[in-house]
Image (cartoon, rainbow, N blue to C red):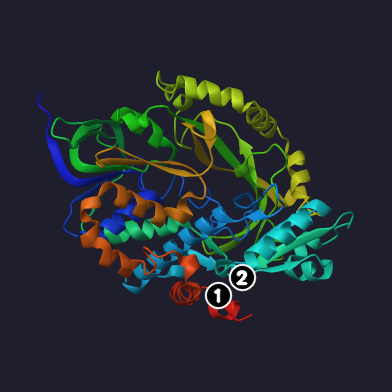
Amino acid sequence: MSKTYTKADVILIGAGIMSATLGTLLKELVPEWNIRVFEKLDSAGEESSNVWNNAGTGHSALCELNYTHEKPDGSIDISKAIKVNEQFQVSRQFWSYLVNNKRIDNPQEFIMSLPHMSLVQGERNVEFLRKRFKTMADNPLFEGMEFSDDPEQLKEWIPLIMKERTMEEPIAATKIDTGTDVNFGTLTRKMFRHLESKGLEVNYKHSVEDIKQTSEGDWEVKVQDMENEKIEYHTANFVFIGGGGGSLHLLQKTGIPESKHIGGFPVSGLFMVCNNPEVIEQHHAKVYGKAKVGAPPMSVPHLDTRFIDNKKSLLFGPFAGFSPKFLKTGSLLDLVTSVKQDNLATMVAAGVKNASLTKYLIEQVILSKEKRMEELREFIPNADSKDWDLVVAGQRVQVIKDTENGGKGTLQFGTEVVTSADGSIAALLGASPGASTAVSVMLEVIERCFPEHLKDWESKIKEMIPSYGEALLEKPELIRELQVSTGRTLGLADAAVVHNK
C-alpha cells in the first residue's frame, strides 16, 4: 500500500514549553508558514512543563548557589549566574511582548512575584555567601539583593525557618524581591491556545515513531494516531524535537552524525508537599540551600512557595529518585534501548566516573519518610510529619557526552541543543534551567537553523526582545528600564521600588 504524505513547513515534536516558544516565535516571524505539532499526551504542557513536574523557580540565578563557585584564589565566579539571569531577562521580554500584543492574557495566572533567597549554615558557608553577595551586589543584574547574618532580621524574612531554631552555628541568607514563581504548564497552554487560533495544527494523542531524511533533504516523520490506531506520514523542511526526556530516542532515530556518542541518564524527583494551610501561610519565598558534599547539582535543597491552581502551596525537595524511564509516562525500557553501538563506550565511561552519583541515587531511593523529614527539619526545625505528603515530580534526562575538558562519558548539567549540519533538524536535551531559558534557547535554534533568514527577521526579533543582540551587562540603564517595563506588563512587584532601595 502506498504511503500518503501530509506536507508542512515545520514539525514540532512535543507540546511543552520549548515547542510552544519556538512555534510562537516562528508564527510571529513568518505567519504564513505551515506548522504542525505532535504530542503523545492528550493536552499541552503535561510532562516536563507541568507545574508539579517543574520547580517553577523562574531560574534567574538569584538564589541558586550551584550557579556560582569559589575559585582557588578565594574570589567568586558568577559568570554562569550572569548568563542564566540574562537568559531569563530575555524570557520576561518575550512574555511581555505576548501580553502587550494580546497573544496571551492574565499573566498573573502563570507568573508571580516572589522573593528568592539563599540560606547557609556554618562559618565557612556564611563566609562564602558574604563574598558571593559582595560580588553580585555590584552587578546591575542583581541590584536590590540584601545580605544578613543577624538572626533577628532572618526571623522577619523567614519566620517559619527560624522558629524554634537552636543557634549552634552561624546562619546567613541573601534576599532579593525581584524573584518569580512561574507555572510553565499554564504558560505553555496559553501559547498553544493562541497558536491554534492562528491556524497552527496541534495533534494530541499522536506518538512519533520514526524520523528519517529523504533524498530531497526534507524529513519524513512516521506518526501513530493513538486514538484511531492508524499510522500517518508527514514531511517537513524543518523538524524540532522538543519531547523532554523522549527527545534522545527520536534524535537517535534521525541518524545524523551529531546524534552519535550522546547518552542520557534519567533522574526522577520527589517533593514533600505541605497539606497544612497554617504552615503554608508562614512562608513566602523560594529559599535555596547548598547541596550536600557528593550530591549532584540537581539535588540542591529548597523550600518553595508555589502558586498552583490559584492556591498558595509549599514544597520541599528535591529528593532524587531513580527510574529507567525517560519520561514520567515513558517505558521501563527507555534507558536500555537508548544504549547504541556508537554511545556504548560513552555510557560505560559515565557509569565508572559517576559511581558516587549512583550510590547517592540508591541511598535517596530507599530513604524512609522519617529520613526525608529529618532533611526537611534542617529548614523547618519543628516540621510535623503529618503536615507533609510525598509527591513524585517529573523525569529529567541528564546528557552524557564526550567533552574536551571532561573527557569520555561526561555528565552534563544543563540544557543542550543539537542541530544537524544543514540546520534542517534540531533537538533539545537536558534539564534545569531549561524552561526558564526557553526563549534564549529557541532563539539559538533559530540562529543555527535559519541563518539565511536572520537579516530579514532581525527587526521583528528586536521588537519582541528589545535587548536582542546586546550584552545587557554593559547597559545598566537598559537592565533597569526592562525590569520596570516587563515587571509592569507582567504584574510583578514594582522593580523601580527595588532598584531605588
Q: Position of residue 434 (x, y in %)?
A: 47, 49
Q: Residue under circle 2?
A: 177
Quadrant in the rendering for residue 495: bottom right
Q: Position of residue 360 (x, y in %)?
A: 67, 32
Identified at 50% across, 56% down, the residue is 83
Above or below residue 390? Residue 336 is above
Q: Residue under circle 1?
A: 493
In primary-sequence order, the first of circles 2 and 1 is: 2
Q: Are marks 2 and 1 in contact (CB under 8 Å)?
A: yes
Depth check: give the residue in front, 322 or 340: 340
- Secondary structure under badge 1? loop
Quadrant in the rendering for residue 75: bottom right
Q: Quadrant of the C terminus?
A: bottom right
- Secondary structure under badge 2? loop
Question: Left or right: where does residue 488 sit relative to residue 311?
Answer: left
Above or below residue 165? Residue 257 is above
Name the residue type under label 2: Asp
Above or below residue 467? Residue 324 is above
Q: Is residue 335 shown to the viewer in this render?
A: yes
